[in-house]
Amino acid sequence: MTNISVIENKISSIRKYLKILERYRQFSQQEIIEDIDRKGAVERYLYLVVQAAIDLAEAVISYKNLRKPSTMSESFHILQEENIIPPELTDQMIKMTGFRNVIAHDYEKLNYDILYEVLQNRLQNIETFLDKVSRL
């Protein structure tokens, strides 16, 4: 698969995950926490959308033949250095990467106030990231 195909596939996946997550925004935090299926779905799709955004950042870096990141977060710093994304978006995407790490590794400590905040108010950062990357 060519780099541009990888980029297109990641963009498509992100859009799909965002659309799925949109369905869960109608529920209150309590309704999500109390329903094990909703709770699991929201956790999983938040993980997937952030992971796909990280993968997209790495695909753009590869496509543009930029320096290789040593961490997932560094991918966003590299895109900022190349003026692909602005500093404030870099900061937000790094926070999303940290959130993804908590879901993946410290799920027993997952703060559902933060999860709900991400679901309701932080997915716009991923949409903004998509917009910036789609202009390449």
Image: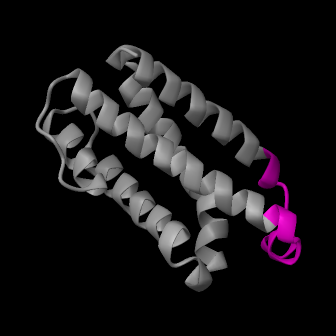
The reply, left or right, for residue 113 in relation to residue 70 is right
The reply, left or right, for residue 25 in relation to residue 35 is left
Q: Is 14 above or below relative to 124?
A: above
The reply, left or right, for residue 35 in relation to residue 72 is right
Q: Residue at x 57, y 36 (%)?
A: 14
**Whether residue 125 can be seen here:** no
Q: In which quarter of the image is residue 20?
A: top right
Q: Residue at x 49, y 41 (%)?
A: 52
Looking at the rendered image, the quarter that the C terminus falls into is top left
Q: What is the total number of numbered labels drawn onto the structure image? A: 0
Q: Is 113 above or below relative to 60?
A: below
Q: Is 104 above or below relative to 1?
A: below
Q: Position of residue 89 (x, y in %)?
A: 35, 48
Q: Does the magenta stretch include residue 33?
A: yes
Q: How is the image coloured?
A: one colour
The reply, left or right, for residue 57 in relation to residue 33 is left
Nearer to us in this view, 24 or 47: 47
Q: Does the magenta stretch include residue 74?
A: no
Nearer to us in this view, 97 or 107: 107
Q: Residue at x 67, y 33 (%)?
A: 16
Identify the residue at the far front of this view: 1
**What range is drawn magenta here?**
23-38
Nearer to us in this view, 5 or 73: 5
